[in-house]
Amino acid sequence: MNPPLEAAIIDDEALARDDLRYLLRAHPEISIIGEAGTVGEGRSLLSRIKPQLLFLDIQLMGGNGFDLVPYAAPACHIIFFTSHNEFAVRAFEVNALDYLLKPVSAKRLAKSLERVAVNNTPSETDSAQTHPLRADDPIFIRTEKEQRFVPLESISAVTAQGGNYTAVCTGDGCSRLVRRTLAEWERCLPHPPFIRIHRSHMININWIDCIRKEQNGACRVFIKDQPDPLTVSRRADQRLRQVMEEWGKLRLPANRPVS
């Protein structure tokens, strides 16, 4: 049996710490080795101990939880929790494993700890791989104009834009330019519903309007609320249709003009 994962709790609400400690009693794989209630206490705590898991409140006396991220060990799993969703907009920017809204439920905590277990298992191929996302996760999107959480299910497509940038298309017809490569998206997005159809495109099959086969053999996918179709590589064509059939979503090509 593996030794318990050492954890610390930093929250300025004593009752919130008590509640979390009570919920963690159902998880013997987690051992709490320290607590703090302010930013100053948190810095002192993290200078003395190196927890493998850190439960960190967003709003703290003397600053906020993000101020403490640099004091945590690089390999530390961070789970943010807060009473206000709007304060969690930076959670995934600092590579947090998850974020929870107060009051934290036993079921939601258990899901977070499942993710901890998965990410605490060494990978033979990539020990620093991007945290895999679940279909019901929010994803942090940061652009030059905004930073926000977007429901993963609302992302219809991700397209390479050159260099380390990609455009994230959402079901409202918006496209946001973010600094993340398509390879990084492919590592963290769940398959399916996401599938790479081309060296430059990934799509969410739930947002497919139709698939059209051209006379020259080229295959194009129309995404709902997106003006231009996306090209499917010959290599990915069969795989896309197979996944669509498995999901029961395959549609006959529509007589829709291709630009």
Image: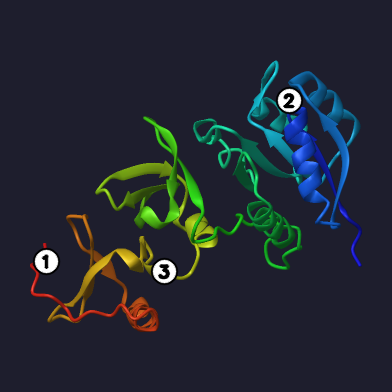
Which percent across, then down, holds residue 161?
35, 49
For the residues labelled 2 and 3, say whether their Cβ atoms are less than 8 Å apart: no
Q: Quadrant of the C terminus?
A: bottom left
Q: Amino acid at mark 1?
A: Val
Q: Which residue is mark 3?
A: 195
> What residue appears at the point 44 percent right and 54 percent down from the top-left corner?
152
- From the viewer's side, name the closer residue of 29 and 119: 29
* Label 2 crowd bin: few (<14), some (14–19), many (20+), radius 10 Å: many
Q: Tell me how the rendering is colored.
A: rainbow
Which percent across, then down, holds residue 10?
76, 32
Q: Is residue 17 above or below residue 201?
A: above
Q: CA distance from mark 2 to mark 3?
A: 43 Å
- From the viewer's side, name the closer residue of 176 and 60: 60
Label whose residue precedes the other's in the sequence (2 or 3): 2
* Label 1 crowd bin: few (<14), some (14–19), many (20+), radius 10 Å: few
Q: CA distance from mark 2 to mark 1?
A: 57 Å
Q: Which residue is mark 1?
A: 258
Under circle 1, the secondary element is loop
Q: Which residue is mark 2?
A: 12
Would you say 185 lies left or right of 78 here? left
Which percent across, then down, holds residue 49?
89, 35
